[in-house]
Image (spheres, rainbow, N blue to C red):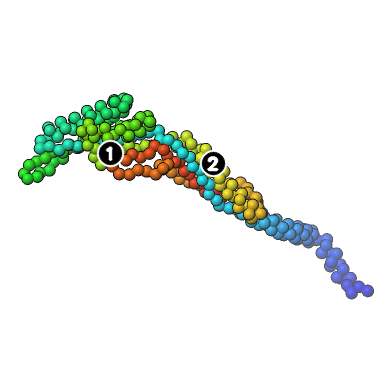
Amino acid sequence: MSNNSPGDTASATAFWRLPNSRALLASSAILAVGVVAGGYLLGDGLTRARVADRSVTVRGLAEREVTADLATWTIAYSATAANLGSAQASVDRDTSSIRAFFGDLGFPEDALQTTGVNVSTYTQNGITNYTVRQRMTLRTNDIERAERAVRNQFDLVRRGVVLEEGSGMSYTFTRLNDIKPEMVAEATRDARAAAQQFANDSGTGVGGIKQATQGYFSIDARDGDGGGWGVAETPYKKVRVVTTVDFYLR
């Protein structure tokens, strides 16, 4: 037997007939479904975010041996005398000897240029002395001929030219931009190989690149630089770059 009175039944019937009541219940049902779906999607999204955030940072190395394409030799010499004319005349004789030395080796005249002249004085025992210092620079792309000049540089001494300290050949590799793209690609491949090894050890796979830093290109002597007077730098270089790459793990 029902305990509801006729008044209660009538109230319930009236409640269901109210338009606002039906809309309220429908909205509540939709809200409940949305909460459930939103919770699922949020949880799934967090899971996918955690997976996407898994990454490994590795470094890749690329090295290449190259030969310099520019040789520069700065030759410094000087003469001292009790008068300026004598000192200058001595320097002029040395200049002629230097030009003859490079001319005999087959260098064109314009490969050798005067790059600086300096005159200084000092007094000793009441006598003023004049020192004339001069610098000449050889600049050439003929590396083989430049090496030959270095090997025969003591012929300048036999010609009476005394080279000051700091006179030596310098070799430069100027075509770095020509090999940069290939070396960066090689370093990236090396980094991916390291990431793959890590992934194999951890039971995962390697995905795409999350972030990468190219790194600094260095150019050093292949066999170590020479130092000291009369010792020339080597034309044989080693170009090196290290890249840092973050790979996604999957």
- State the image quarter where residue 145 is shown: top left
Q: Looking at the image, which residue is at 37% across and 37% down?
A: 171
Look at the image and tell me in which quarter the N terminus lies.
bottom right
Q: x and y percent of residue 147 in the render?
A: 35, 33
Number of callouts: 2
The answer to which of 111 and 155 lies nearer the viewer is 155
- Residue with the most extreme right position: 1
Can residue 248 be seen here? The reply is: no
Where residue 149 sits, quadrant-wise, is top left
The amino acid sitting under disc 2 is: Glu
For mark 1, give the secondary structure. loop
As helix, strand or loop, the secondary structure at mark 2 comes to helix
Local crowd at mark 2 within 10 Å, few (<14), some, or many (≥20)? some
Amino acid type, residue under disc 1 in the picture = Ser
Name which residue lies at 75% across and 58% down. 33
Between 165 and 84, the residue placed more toward the observer is 165
Query: Spatial distance from mark 2 to mark 1, Cα to Cα?
Result: 38 Å
From the top left corner, tell me how far across and down residue 6 is, in percent.
89, 70
Q: Residue furthest left?
A: 126
Is residue 39 placed above or below 122 in the rendered structure? below
Tell me where residue 109 appears, x and y as whole percent.
29, 25
Question: In the rendered structure, which disc, 2 or 1, sits on the residue that comes first in sequence?
Answer: 1
Residue 129 in the image, given as x and y percentages of width and height:
11, 40
State the residue position of label 2.
186
Give the number of the disc on residue 12. none
User: In screen coordinates, is 194 left or right of 1?
Assistant: left
Q: Residue at x 63, y 48 (%)?
A: 207
Residue corresponding to mark 1: 167
Mark 1 crowdedness (10 Å alpha carbons): few <14, some 14-19, many ≥20: many
Residues 13 and 199: in front is 199
The foreground one among 190 and 36 is: 190
Kindly check if marks 2 and 1 are in contact, taking CB atoms under 8 A apart as contact.
no
